[in-house]
Amino acid sequence: MSQVTAAELARREASAFGPGVGDYLELLKPRVMSLVVFTGFVGLYLAPGRLHPLLAAVAVLCIAVAAGASGAINMWYERDIDALMERTRNRPLPAGRMAPGEALGFGCVLAGAAVMVMGLALNWAAAALLALTIAFYVFVYTIGLKRRTPQNIVIGGAAGAFPPLVGWAAATGDVGWPALALFALIFFWTPPHFWALSLYRAGDYARAGVPMLPVVAGPAETKKQMLLYTLVLWPVSLAPALLHVTGWVYGVAALALSMLFTALAATVLRSDDARWPKRMFGFSILYLFLLFLLMALDRAPGILSGLAPGFGA
Amino acid sequence: MMVMALMNEREKRIRAKNRALLAALLGVVAMFYLIALARMGGW
């Protein structure tokens, strides 16, 4: 007679109930979605021209739904390695609360709906970019790169960088240089952000056979690379001010935040204390959030430009 | 007794899912109505 573990009993009990509404929401990766939605909104807000507030809200909703759909398809494909990692083993698929096909179907329906609504309500350039974002995240990052190369999140980071482009395209119907500057900012921010996480989750990634940089090249090389990327962020974070999308209040704040990010990366490089990568991960989220918030505030008439008359956009 | 409790819980979950689906469908209908108004310039 086989021994049934407590974990297996809990799993059987959960599958007897079937997935709940909370499980579907969990598939959408709401925490990742919030930053994606915010950067997409700022891209839309900074774009020239006027958009009906309702259509702007629909565009942001489409970006959110597309991000959630990508997350659901990602969870479907990665259910085998999710079961091996501490951080992800309680997700609906590895925990046995949902059938894999259900997650895939849910993700595909949401992805199709988000692209169609974006095309019908806003324009087809934004819809095409949104479709490209989903395809890049699923096919290039999740299926193509993640399990094959330690450069997975460097190239795959582009998927997370698309939302401001989509937002900009939703408002203007095309993609301008300022939108590409926003893309570059998220693209170069992604490696130090993810490598900080993977430094203190290296055991998890090694167990699942995911070749993250700390697993393949070791912590010292990872920390060096993180420092280099934070240095690249100095000019990249200044680009919106140089392109006159924002004023110089943003520029000065961006430079200060980038210096702080680099200082944190230098501390991570020097120290073996496991708390520093965690702090760096936390700060990286705050860094990106503050940069995009400052861009939006600097663009809003009379908020930041009033602090430094003559230096506004 | 245990089976009954499981059945009740399962039914509760199905009901919650159906309500969420209904809300989503109504939301989509309302959204398309408002999009049409906004695009036609009537609002």
Image (cartoon, coloured by chain):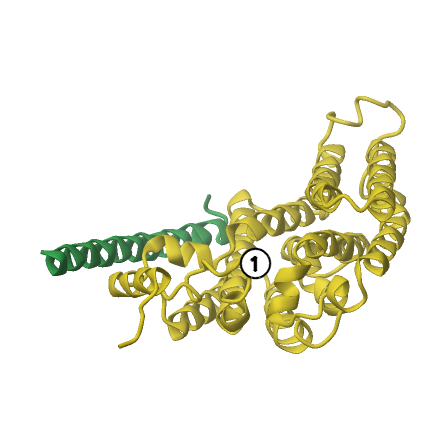
Chain colours: A yellow, B green
Left or right: residue A48 versus residue B18 is: right
Q: Is residue A162 above or below residue A293?
A: below
Q: How many marks?
A: 1
Residue at 44% from the left image edge and 66% from the top image edge: A94
User: Does residue B20 appear in this view?
Assistant: yes
Q: Is residue A281 above or below residue A293?
A: below
Residue at 69% from the left image edge and 74% from the top image edge: A145
Give the camera-side residue of A26 and A225: A225
Q: Quadrant of residue A195?
A: bottom right
On the image, the x and y values in percent for residue A309 come to 86, 23
Q: Which quadrant of the rendered structure holds the C terminus of chain A?
A: top right
Give the camera-side residue of A222 and A143: A222
On the image, the x and y values in percent for residue A159 come to 67, 64
Residue at 50% from the left image edge and 53% from the top image edge: B39
Left or right: residue A116 versus residue A276 is: left
Question: Disc 1 designates what residue?
Answer: A122
Residue at 74% from the left image edge and 46% from the top image edge: A277
Q: Chain of mark 1?
A: A
On the image, the x and y values in percent for residue A128 come to 62, 69
Estimate how packed mark 1 is, as few (under 14), some (14 to 19) or many (20 or more) residues with alpha carbons within 10 Å.
many
Give the camera-side residue of A196 and A60: A196
On the image, the x and y values in percent for residue A65 come to 50, 58
Q: Is residue A43 above or below residue A299?
A: below
Q: Which quadrant of the rendered structure holds the N terminus of chain A?
A: bottom left
Q: Which three-letter amino acid code belongs to the residue tagged 1?
A: Leu
Left or right: residue A258 versus residue B14 is: right
Left or right: residue A73 versus residue A138 is: left
